[in-house]
Image: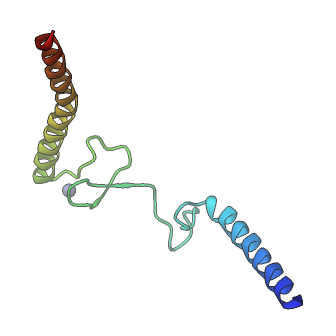
Amino acid sequence: MADKQKLADQIRSNVEMAKEGEKKRKGGKTGLPKSASSNAYVAPHRHCTICQCPIAKKREPPVCGDSKCEDEFESRQRQRKRWNMLLYIAPAIMIGALVLQLMAST
Ligand SMILES: [Zn+2]
């Protein structure tokens, strides 16, 4: 019985420790050093959505200067817009069909 109590205590302390660790990690999401003087420091940046090479953080659209990437990004954007439109149109058509059915049955 005493052993069980001990085990429970140990588990509880482990959980506390894990919580502490989480709190510490929350400061820097990636665990990378924040100061620019450190060797592992990575300046804030983002990646080209097409080829993933690092680009300036505020760059819009988020692609590198490559014309291939720009074209690809454009076509992806167009495709996304088409999908968004479809997402609105599909339920509208379904509702329209339902209404037509209801009107036909009366
Ligand atoms: Zn690129």
**As drawn, 17 above or below 59:** below
Q: Which of 58 and 99 is in front in this view?
A: 99
Horizontal side of residue 65 vs 22, given as left or right = left
How far across and how far down the image is residue 10, in percent?
79, 82
Quarter of the figure with the N terminus: bottom right
Horizontal side of residue 13 vs 91, given as left or right = right
- Residue at left offset 19%, top offset 50%: 65
Q: Nearer the viewer, residue 20 or 49?
A: 20
How far across and how far down the image is residue 27, in percent?
63, 58
What is the number of callouts on the image? 0
Q: How is the image coloured?
A: rainbow
Q: In which quarter of the image is residue 28?
A: bottom right
- Residue at left offset 84%, top offset 90%: 3
Horizontal side of residue 5 vs 55, given as left or right = right
- Residue at left offset 86%, top offset 83%: 5
Q: Which of 87 and 24 is in front in this view?
A: 87
- Residue at left offset 56%, top offset 67%: 31
How far across and how far down the image is residue 11, in percent?
75, 79
Dividing the image into four equal quarters, which quarter contains ligand 1? bottom left
How far across and how far down the image is residue 72, in percent?
12, 49
Q: Residue furthest right?
A: 2
Quarter of the figure with the C terminus: top left
Q: Which of 65 and 27 is in front in this view?
A: 27
**As drawn, 68 above or below 100:** below
